[in-house]
Image (cartoon, helix red, strand yellow):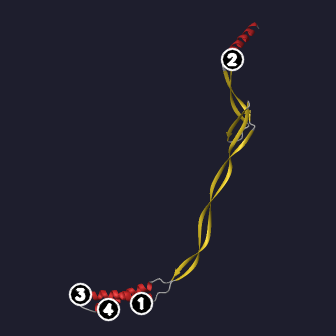
């Protein structure tokens, strides 16, 4: 029994000496959160919509001009043949070319009289364009958790509401 008391006394002296020689220690305490407030972020997105409308568009018809082209070709050929009949030697070539040129002009003039006049009509055409509208909405971006520890307010942001905030406390003597 005396031995047991002696061992207990030695153990108490060792612990007491260790505690007195230590300058401090650190511990974690959990403080109850008094409020968790959501933090909002604004998100904007572009929404495309198509807007269409009917418009009147002019359409031309007739007056193709083919008759004066046909007349010019036929007149040039006939003028060339007639010019070839006139003259002789080197003058024959000049007469053929001259007859062809005059035939083209005459044939074009006669052909243009047979062209149909150009008319304009209108048709309805649908025109569409993409228009973008900006739409904004708010989403929860996290939480601001508030607690009080020894008269000081502690604020911590987190992804979800917290019930407790861990606080590291160092005690020193």
Point out the tag, 4 or 1, that comes first from the N-terminus: 4
Residue 156: image x %, image y %?
68, 37
The residue pinned by badge 2 equals 19
Residue at horizontal 69%, vertical 37%?
A: 155
Residue 106 lies in quadrant: bottom left
In the structure shown, which secondary structural element does the residue marked by tag 2 occupy? helix
Disc 4 on helix, strand or loop? helix
Nearest to N terminus: mark 3 or mark 1: 3
Extreme-top residue of the structure = 2
Q: Name the residue rendered at 70%, 42% in the picture.
A: 143
x then y, percent, for residue 68: 42, 86
Q: Secondary structure at mark 3?
A: helix
Q: Quadrant of residue 13?
A: top right
Q: How far apart, in angstroms, are the residues tagged by discs 3 and 1?
A: 31 Å
Q: Earlier in the sequence, mark 2 or mark 1?
A: 2
Q: Residue furthest left?
A: 89
Residue nearer the viewer, 102 or 158: 102
Q: How packed is label 3: few (under 14 Cα within 10 Å), some, or many (20 or more)?
A: few
Q: CA distance from mark 4 to mark 1?
A: 18 Å
Give the Cα distance between marks 2 and 1: 128 Å
The residue drawn where x is 34% and y is 89% is 79
Q: Is residue 62 left or right of residue 96?
A: right
Tell me the quarter of the picture where residue 2 sits: top right
Q: Which residue is mark 1?
A: 110
Q: Which residue is mark 4?
A: 82
In the picture, measured across the screen, residue 70 lies left or right of residue 151, that is left
- Circles 3 and 1, Cβ within 8 Å, touching? The answer is no
């Amino acid at each position: 029994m005396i031995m047991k008391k002696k061992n207990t006394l030695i153990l108490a002296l060792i612990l007491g000496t260790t505690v007195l020689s230590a300058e401090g220690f650190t511990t974690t305490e959990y403080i109850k959160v008094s409020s968790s407030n959501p933090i909002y972020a604004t998100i904007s997105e572009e929404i495309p919509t198509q807007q269409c409308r009917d418009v009147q568009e002019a359409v031309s018809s007739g007056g193709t001009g083919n008759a004066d082209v046909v007349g010019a070709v036929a007149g040039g050929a006939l003028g060339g043949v007639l010019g070839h009949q006139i003259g002789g030697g080197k003058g024959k070539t000049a007469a053929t070319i001259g007859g062809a040129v005059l035939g083209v002009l005459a044939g074009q003039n006669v052909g243009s009289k047979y062209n149909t006049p150009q008319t304009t009509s209108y048709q309805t055409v649908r025109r569409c364009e993409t228009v973008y509208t900006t739409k904004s909405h708010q989403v929860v971006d996290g939480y601001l958790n508030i607690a009080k520890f020894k008269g000081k307010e502690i604020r911590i942001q987190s992804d979800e509401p917290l019930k407790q905030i861990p606080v590291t406390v160092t005690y020193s003597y």
